[in-house]
Image: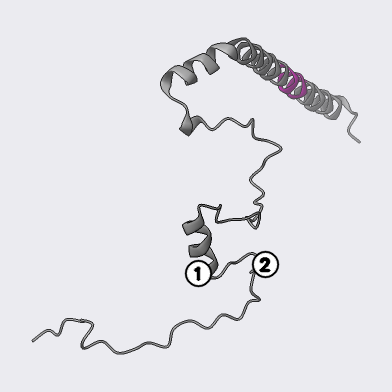
Amino acid sequence: MKVFKQWSNSKPTEGKKFTMPSLTVPDQTMSMRTILDRFAKGLPVVDGKEPLWDDDAETSSGINPKMLDLVDLQELGMKNQDKIQRLEKLKKEEEITAAQKKAEIKQKAKQELLDELKKATEAPQH
């Protein structure tokens, strides 16, 4: 007979012991009483004690695409179409120059190997 684990027949477990230091910042919490009082009075609950998060503010454009509808996304795309085309053109040019440099380096290495081989075969043997 299989015994199913339920709240009435389960055994308590040890749990976890945290050994790392706490990352809690002092004075960023309010008691439940304070939160309920502020809510009842219609005051903001955070009261300037909201933590500041570093969410790559320097790199973000301030636009959250998840909050935009399809029309807004289309307008944004149309406004940036010129920039997109310019960047794509620049990318293609960089790929072409990189391929040309790679081909030049490959040709130069091949020529050096041929020259060394030619010198080795032309050298007088004693």
Name which residue lies at 61% across and 11% down.
85
Percent position of residue 112, x then y? 82, 25
Q: Check the picture and name the quadrant holding the N terminus.
A: bottom left
**Magenta-colored segment: predominant secondary structure:** helix
Q: Which residues are magenta?
A: 100-107
- 36 w.r.t. 88: above or below: below
Per the rendering, the mark at residue 48 is none
Per the rendering, the mark at residue 25 is 2
Quadrant of the rendered structure where residue 15 is?
A: bottom left
Percent position of residue 35, x then y? 52, 63
Percent position of residue 107, x then y? 75, 20
Q: Check the picture and name the quadrant holding the C terminus.
A: top right
Name which residue lies at 64% across and 30% down.
61
Asked if the residue under mark 1 is in contact with the one under mark 2, i.e. CB atoms within 8 Å, the reply is: no
- Residue 117 as seen in the image, left or right of residue 5: right
In the rendered structure, which amino acid carries the disc numbered 1?
Met
Q: Nearer the viewer, residue 88 or 105?
A: 88
Mark 2 or mark 1, which has the lower sequence index? Answer: 2
| Residue at the left extreme of this rendering | 1
Q: Which residue is mark 1?
A: 32
